[in-house]
Amino acid sequence: MFSLWEIILLQVVNGLILGSFYALVALGYSMVYGIIKLLNFAHGDIYMTGAFICLTAFGFISKVIGGVPGVVASIVAAMMFCALLGFIVQRVAYKPLFGAPRLSLLITAIGVSLVVSNTVMVTNSQFMFFTSGLDNTAGFKFGEITITYVQIVLIVTTAGLMIGLNRFISRTMWGKAMRAIATDMDTCRLMGINVNTVIGLTFMIGSALAAVAGGMACVYYGNVHYSMGYIIGMKAFTSAVIGGIGSIPGAMLGGLLLGLLEAAGTQLYGSAWKDVFAFVILIVMLIFKPTGLLGRTEIERM
């Protein structure tokens, strides 16, 4: 029987891991929305694609190298594939509609989501299982519970990626260009900034982060399915709204906060209420603070 502090520690770790997946996918939502005001509902399917690519790549790579190097190489392969996929989707589906009403972009994003998910479904509609060979039981013991090394690595990796992205956005020329385009795209064109290239890079970075989340989920949960992108896409959107959609720190905060709240709700009310609990938080947030915790009110210029 677990003591109270053991239950709290266990749910905090579970919440941080779940929140890490939400935060990585939410970063893509916020980056794209911040620049072109598009809710890219296909982003959850990029996450799902990353999980499948990680699984497939590991099947080949593990014949040469296994263990941690094989897992890392598989996730890197998923990042590269999904970055390319995100760039192609942006150029083919979204770029021709940049001057169109936002509703046209939104409908296109839903269409892209269906195309990606159904393409994977046609390829394989069954649950696929991932066996990494890593020891998921070794770790640090705290009373009756064990915080595994895999859990620690997942949390630390996510933290490193989020910190690295924040520094990239705030300190590099590419990051400054992204922030400038988010403020005034037309003026950036007049100043000589290659807007299309920067937008393409934004999609690539967001898609690569979603692929990392998909790969880590593949390793951690040990299975993938073509429908796994839908619910995490909605949860990531919820995370972005909680933190303030368009805000990079907000997406990080919102994802981790939602993961912790969801873990607490699951402990108190059971896993059957997990999704209900998350979307109730979304509704409450939209009612009382629609700009999110770190979001800013936008002023539409006529």
Image: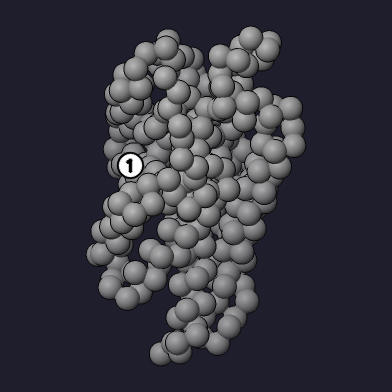
Q: Is residue 59 visible?
A: no
Q: Residue at x 47, y 60 (%)?
A: 257
Residue 160 horizontal side relative to residue 184, left or right: right
Specify the quadrant that holds the C terminus: top left
x and y, in percent, of residue 207 in the image: 52, 33
What residue is shown with label 1?
230
Q: Is residue 247 visible?
A: yes
x and y, in percent, of residue 225 in the image: 35, 44
168 lies above or below 111: below
Give the class, few, some or many, for how many residues have Cα within 10 Å of label 1's Cα (few <14, many ≥20): many
- Residue closest to the far front: 302
Residue 152 horizontal side relative to residue 232, left or right: right
**Pick the front one: 301 or 83:** 301
113 lies above or below 88: below
Q: Residue at x 46, y 35 (%)?
A: 298
x and y, in percent, of residue 294 in the image: 52, 49
Q: Residue at x 37, y 47 (%)?
A: 290
Residue 8 horizontal side relative to residue 208, left or right: left
**Pick the front one: 248 or 76:** 248
**Pick the front one: 183 or 110:** 183
The image quarter in which residue 74 lies: top right
Under tag 1, what secondary structure? helix
x and y, in percent, of residue 13 in the image: 52, 68
Callout 1, which amino acid?
A: Tyr
**Pick the front one: 189 or 21:** 189
Q: Residue at x 39, y 71 (%)?
A: 264
Specify the quadrant that holds the N terminus: bottom left
